[in-house]
Amino acid sequence: MILSPKIENFVLHCGEMGSRWGFNRTIGQMVGLLVIHEQPLTANEIAESLKISRGNVSMGIKELQSWQLVKVTHIPGDRKEYYAPSGSIWDLANRVFEERRKREIDPTLSLLRDQILDGPNSAEEEYAQNQIQAIHDLLETVTKWSAELQRLSPEQLQTLMKLGSSVGKVIDLKDKLLKKS
Amino acid sequence: MILSPKIENFVLHCGEMGSRWGFNRTIGQMVGLLVIHEQPLTANEIAESLKISRGNVSMGIKELQSWQLVKVTHIPGDRKEYYAPSGSIWDLANRVFEERRKREIDPTLSLLRDQILDGPNSAEEEYAQNQIQAIHDLLETVTKWSAELQRLSPEQLQTLMKLGSSVGKVIDLKDKLLKKS
DNA sequence: TTAAAGTTTCAATAATTACTGAAACTTTAG
DNA sequence: CTAAAGTTTCAGTAATTATTGAAACTTTAA
């Protein structure tokens, strides 16, 4: 399981970016490795390729499963587990996006809801209350939008994405559209 | 600079979320504090409110400035610097979004571009090359879209966001729209 | 000038997070 | 059943990241 320079380069980069994408270096490397390899890999192969301990791989796989980014496969007559990405690049990106929304937005939304129900407890909390409401509204809109995007088929999403610079035009024509629908 | 329970709660929560939003706990608390307070605060007030050292505040402010999230103001006859958020909640969210795109996507896009120019170096790199291309295309689309969103006025954005569940309909009517534009 | 008010820097250290490897656990073929 | 193959757990330790606080630096009023 020796990696070619190009692939090693790619995997190491995924490691560096790992923490920015929401996991840690090792897990970033694992994702990179799984994505770039056509065949599923065993835990031992992963450990060997990345020069990390078997235990670390096990923890990493667990974490990746909590993100729903890997699937386990088996080869007939072989009891080892083989790991592979749980879908296309697009699927993976979608899952990361969704999982991050859950971790980065949901807890705050929940706190802010409670604080809004509580109401301002004094005159100087008026401004605070307004700001809390503003953050709440923003996060709620983002959440709704994100749910909407999840509902779309990959083809629709591609279409939407490719709309690119004509998004502005779409918006300008919104009223017309809504009448027709 | 003693905080009311509700505000303290909010600020502490921002601290907990800080690392998930791309900074650290202290900086998260600083953002929370600045956003929730109507009046700009001095570095000393921030240090006192959050019970952290003066030096830490200085570093935090520097970091927040690199994210373009704070602005400095002065009060006539007072040489202290007063810090406040650099805009509305919406502005701040936009900046965080943009900055994260720069940190989380741009470096990868740049690496992948180079790797694509390099071309596959062997037969077994064929698959790898395809995957690299797929990731590249996805990230490029996201980048373009994000740039497009930045170009829109806040009002247009609001409109787009509020479109919510009718996004699907918009897509279905895309062709019709593009003819008219 | 200069000294008081304010700010920044950074080496030392604290706090957190990640990793290893050996032991415990699980599964299955015989 | 049991032993071999495989997997997971977790205490100890390594690596990383954040924080303090004292010294250096900057600005300004007198």
Image (cartoon, coloured by chain):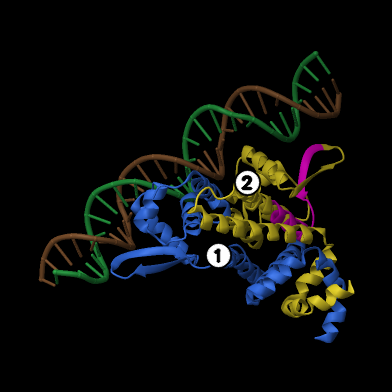
Chain colours: A yellow, B blue, C brown, D green
Residue A98 inside the magenta-drawn segment: yes
Amino acid bearing label 2: Asp
Kindly identify the residue that appears in the image at 64 percent across and 53 percent down. A105
Kindly identify the residue that appears in the image at 62 percent across and 65 percent down. B105
Q: CA distance from mark 1 to mark 2?
A: 23 Å
Q: Which residue is mark 2?
A: A114
Residue B68 inside the magenta-drawn segment: no
Count of numbered badges drawn on the protein: 2
Q: Nearer the viewer, mark 1 or mark 2?
A: 2
Identify the disc placed on residue B92: 1
Q: Is residue A138 left or right of residue B172?
A: left
Q: Position of residue B61 (x, y in %)?
A: 42, 60
Chain ID, mark 1: B
Amino acid bearing label 1: Leu
Q: Nearer the viewer, residue A156 or A58?
A: A156
Q: What's drawn in magenta, residue-wise?
A: A79-99
